[in-house]
């Protein structure tokens, strides 16, 4: 099979081992075929029928995403260009967000009145959906460690009317020690190599991909997972997600963290809409064996409407705090 856009041979070889032959061709195609745009309601006050009617009246042809618990639609890229001039979009009623990204928030399942942390929040798409689902009730913290991304996120969320969100600019690793056992739910959409975002016609999208970078990111992801889990109240839920295929950054990072945590963590099954094609989490990769419970995680298979994504949900079943230094975890 030809190499689309000169993607790194090592990356393609790993991808071929990760996906079955029946899916590999479609996964390759996903790097070169533009996806439809997913839109969701950002400001309450409209029903699905109202929104669809307004869009059709404007000459647009939305396709409803019926399986989501809030109004959402797919539109073609050509339609989206027209929609960007419509008041529903310019005034922030509708918001463009990838379907896989929305699903990570639905797996988190935030509720009004809870205390929730989005640990690596920028650019804020998931944060704004969490805020929408919390209906302005409870306490939501959006954190990021990159100054530029943080202030862009702050502007976006405030322009959307979310001025009640607590926004912090700090290392995610700090939460586990500064605010231990404080949150009902934590979303860790971890910094990753972004393999699912590679574009065959854009060499810059590769981001200088190398296996060394993958391994370094996996170490950071482990530390962030430990911090996120420490910040959870007993009984709380942590969702770990990435937009990369790399097992080292997904099952590998989580398995290393779970080894530290022990019996205080229970992995729960991830349930997604039937129309979304998924693969179960891996229980082994190369010479590594992972806990059998990691099969409860899922990989979203990239396609014309879904981005490649990894999602895992874990519940904290008892007290556990991370009080070790970064260097200790680097050596572990």
Image (cartoon, rainbow, N blue to C red):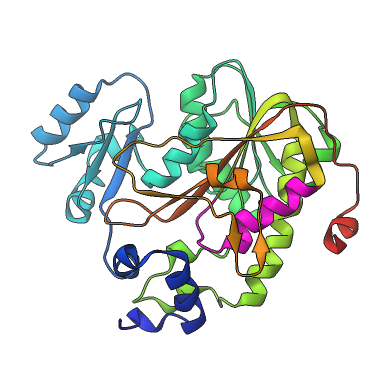
Quadrant that contains the N terminus: bottom left
The magenta region covers: 242-259
Q: Is residue 257 magenta?
A: yes
**Residue at (35%, 25%) from the top-left corner?**
69
**Residue at (61%, 51%) from the top-left corner?**
190
Residue 301 visible in the current orientation: yes
Residue 67 percent across, percent down from the top left: 30, 31
Q: Is residue 325 left or right of residue 225?
A: right
Image quadrant assignment for residue 160: top left
Quadrant that contains the C terminus: bottom right
Q: Nearer the viewer, residue 167 or 296?
A: 296
Residue 213 percent across, percent down from the top left: 65, 72
Residue 7 percent across, percent down from the top left: 42, 80
Count the labels in the image: 0
Q: Nearer the viewer, residue 49 or 183?
A: 183
**Residue at (50%, 56%) from the top-left corner?**
243
Q: Nearer the viewer, residue 138 or 189?
A: 189
Residue 57 percent across, percent down from the top left: 9, 33
Image quadrant assignment for residue 316: top right
**Residue at (50%, 73%) from the top-left corner?**
14
Q: Is residue 23 left or right of residue 52?
A: right
């Amino acid at each position: 099979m030809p190499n689309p856009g000169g993607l790194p041979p090592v990356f393609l070889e790993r991808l071929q081992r990760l996906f079955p032959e029946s899916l590999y061709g479609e996964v390759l195609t996903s790097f070169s075929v533009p996806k439809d745009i997913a839109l969701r309601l950002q400001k309450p006050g409209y029903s699905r029928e109202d929104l669809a009617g307004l869009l059709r009246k404007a000459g647009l042809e939305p396709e409803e995403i019926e399986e989501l618990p809030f109004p959402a639609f797919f539109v073609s890229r050509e339609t989206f260009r027209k929609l960007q001039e419509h008041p529903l979009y310019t005034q922030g009623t509708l918001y463009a967000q990838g379907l896989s990204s929305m699903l990570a928030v639905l797996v988190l399942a935030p509720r009004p009145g809870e205390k929730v942390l989005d640990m690596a929040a920028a650019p804020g798409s998931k944060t704004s959906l969490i805020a929408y689902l919390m209906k302005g009730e409870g306490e939501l913290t959006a954190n990021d460690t990159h100054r530029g991304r943080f202030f862009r996120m702050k502007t976006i969320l405030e322009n959307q009317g979310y001025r009640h969100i607590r926004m912090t600019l700090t290392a995610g690793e700090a939460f586990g020690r500064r605010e231990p056992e404080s949150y009902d739910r934590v979303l860790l959409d971890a910094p990753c190599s972004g393999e699912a975002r590679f574009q065959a016609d854009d060499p810059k999208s590769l981001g200088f991909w190398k296996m060394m970078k993958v391994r370094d990111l996996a170490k950071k992801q482990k530390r962030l997972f430990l911090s996120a889990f420490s910040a959870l109240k007993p009984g709380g839920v942590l969702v770990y997600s990435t937009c990369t295929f790399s097992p080292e950054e997904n099952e590998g990072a989580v398995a290393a963290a779970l080894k530290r945590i022990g019996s205080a963590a229970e992995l729960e099954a991830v349930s997604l809409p039937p129309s979304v094609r998924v693969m179960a989490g891996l229980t082994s990769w190369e010479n590594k064996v992972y806990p059998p419970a990691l099969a409860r995680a899922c990989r979203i298979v990239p396609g014309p409407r879904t981005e490649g994504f990894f999602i895992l949900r874990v519940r904290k079943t008892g007290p556990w705090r991370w009080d070790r230094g970064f260097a200790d975890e680097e050596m572990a």
